[in-house]
Image (cartoon, helix red, strand yellow):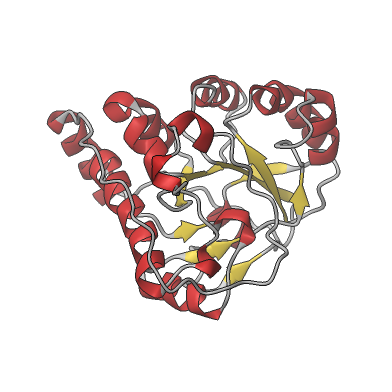
């Protein structure tokens, strides 16, 4: 069965685990479901574009070479638990990076959660349109996976993304070349909470709490247990003196297109 034919609910259960088998280049590009139009408030979008011209997101400068920084990243949304996650992060004034799937953005009725990610000051990144292992696709298929998601996110939020995460960590030189052409840096991770496998909030919080200075932590906002883990996770890291930053803030600037980042 092709990916586009799977129910969206099943797509949301796909986990972002490290892809460890040999990569094979597919000779045939997969068929990608067309984007569905999102309902957009033109007045709100105009205000957002005006604020971006004045500087978006609000500038926050951290010297992560001197202080203990950690970047929390959430994949595969936006989903039904993303709104609650945003509430929890807002209560603590914590910023994170969200790697969104294009089909999930299309399913976000009115684009409200996707826009809120941006409006709350979080970094938003490209996690492909349908979550395939990119290293197995043709160049054209990779381009379509990235561009479809770039286009719908820009249409909904006014933001042109500058970072991406390859599903399953599946990348190679050809994928890197395509991300470079699209102006996207590849963001991997060095702390895997395995929240897709172990749906226990205490376990997820414990693994995230083992982050080191400069770590990029892999999480998924499509799992309720992960969102349940966030308060304890933030408490543990805060007690250890960590500052919570976006991926770009971790490096002090927008990461370079095509380059792969695992930690600072």
**Residue 180 placement, left or right of 242:** left
**Residue 88 placement, left or right of 189:** left
Vertical placement of residue 4 versus 164, above or below: above
Which is nearer the eye, 84 or 142?
142
Q: In which quarter of the image is residue 49?
A: top left
Q: Position of residue 234 (x, y in %)?
A: 73, 30
Please give the count of numbered marks on the rendered protein: 0
Which is nearer the eye, 24 or 150?
24
Q: Residue at image x 52%, y 26%? A: 82
Extreme-left residue of the structure: 42
Q: Residue at image x 24%, y 50%? A: 53
Vertical placement of residue 223 versus 210, above or below: above
Vertical placement of residue 44 versus 98, above or below: above
Q: Residue at image x 23%, y 44%? A: 155
Extreme-front residue of the structure: 1
Q: Residue at image x 32%, y 36%? A: 106
């Amino acid at each position: 069965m092709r990916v586009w034919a799977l129910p969206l609910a099943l797509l949301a259960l796909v986990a972002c685990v490290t892809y460890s088998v040999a990569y094979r280049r597919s000779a045939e590009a997969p068929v990608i479901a067309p984007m569905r139009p999102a309902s957009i408030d033109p007045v709100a979008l105009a205000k957002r574009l005006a604020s971006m011209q004045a500087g978006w997101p609000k500038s926050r400068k951290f010297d992560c070479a001197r202080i203990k920084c950690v970047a929390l990243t959430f994949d595969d949304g936006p989903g039904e638990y993303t709104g609650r996650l945003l509430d929890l992060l807002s209560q603590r004034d914590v910023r994170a990076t969200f790697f969104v799937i294009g089909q999930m953005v299309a399913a976000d009725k009115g684009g409200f959660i996707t826009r809120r990610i941006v409006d709350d000051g979080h970094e938003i990144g490209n996690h492909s349109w349908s979550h395939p292992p990119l290293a197995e696709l043709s160049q054209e298929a990779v381009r379509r996976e990235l561009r479809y998601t770039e286009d719908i996110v820009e249409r909904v939020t006014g933001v042109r993304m500058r970072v991406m995460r390859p599903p399953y960590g599946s990348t190679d030189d050809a994928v890197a070349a395509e991300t470079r052409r699209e102006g996207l840096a590849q963001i991997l991770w060095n702390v895997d909470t395995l929240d897709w496998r172990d749906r226990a909030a205490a376990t997820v919080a414990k693994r995230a709490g083992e982050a080191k200075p400069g770590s990029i932590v892999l999480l998924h906002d499509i799992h309720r247990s992960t969102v349940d883990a966030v308060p304890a996770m933030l408490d543990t890291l805060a007690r250890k003196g960590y500052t919570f930053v976006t991926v770009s803030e971790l490096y002090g600037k927008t990461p370079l297109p095509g380059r792969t980042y695992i930690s600072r």
